[in-house]
Image: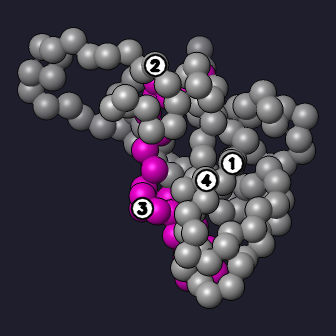
Amino acid sequence: MRTRGFEKITKYMDVDFPMPERKTQLSAGYDFCLPEAVTLEPGKLQLVPTGVKAYMQGGEYLGMHIRSSMAVKKHIMLVNNVGIIDADYYNNEDNEGHIMLALLNMGEAPITLPKGERVAQGIFYNYLVADGDGDTEKAVRGGGFGSTSK
């Protein structure tokens, strides 16, 4: 049985790019590399594809974080600070669970990030629920990015 990991989405299946991986023995995060070059215009929010989806167990989520080198050296931020990828986002009907990064260039000039650039890192987390949470019926995910409240 598979527990947690990463797969390419269908659109990027034939594109050669590094899959998320931890770079050192004690790294918490899996570095995400870009499957294609992207130019970030200053002051403009852009959804940037990773070409990747993540599978995990119930009671877990994948937290997406900007790499510190992107934030400090290139003035790029992840707009929502931490992206939350729920377990039921995997293989959703809208976008197959494609993890997208909401990036903002805080600098004054465009920045081009090359294919293969390590931009973000994903960390798997466990979470807890409140007492009585199981007393109410929960919806089944019906869509992709930003669809939980639709």
Q: Which of 124 and 99 lies nearest the eye of the viewer?
A: 99
Label 3: how many Cα within 10 Å (few below 14, some 14–19, many 20+): few
CA separation, marks 3 and 1?
Answer: 17 Å
Q: Mark 2 vs mark 1: which is more N-terminal?
A: 1
Type of amino acid under label 3? Asn
Looking at marks 2 and 3 on the same chain, the residue that comes earlier in the sequence is marked by 3
Counting from the top left corner in percent of width and height, residue 67 is at 57, 67
Q: Can you identify the residue that label 2 sits on?
A: 142
- Residue identifier under label 4: 47
Q: Are marks 2 and 1 in contact (CB under 8 Å)?
A: no
Residue that label 3 marks: 81
Real-space CA distance between mark 4 and mark 2, rounded to the nearest whole angstrom: 21 Å
- Residue 73 counted in the magenta span: yes
Confirm or deny contact between disc 4 and disc 2 (CB under 8 A).
no
Residue sitting at x 20%, y 31%: 129
* The quadrant where residue 38 appears: bottom right
Q: What element carries label 4?
A: strand
Question: Badges 4 and 1: C-beta atoms under 8 Å apart?
Answer: yes
Mark 2, other Cα within 10 Å: few <14 / some 14–19 / many ≥20: few
For image coordinates 66% across by 54% down, the residue present is 48
Residue position for label 1: 49
Span highlighted in magenta in the image: 65-91
Q: Which of marks 4 and 3 is in front?
A: 4
Q: Which of marks 4 and 3 is nearer the N terminus?
A: 4
- Hey, what amino acid is under mark 1? Pro
Q: Describe the element under mark 1 as helix, strand or loop.
A: strand
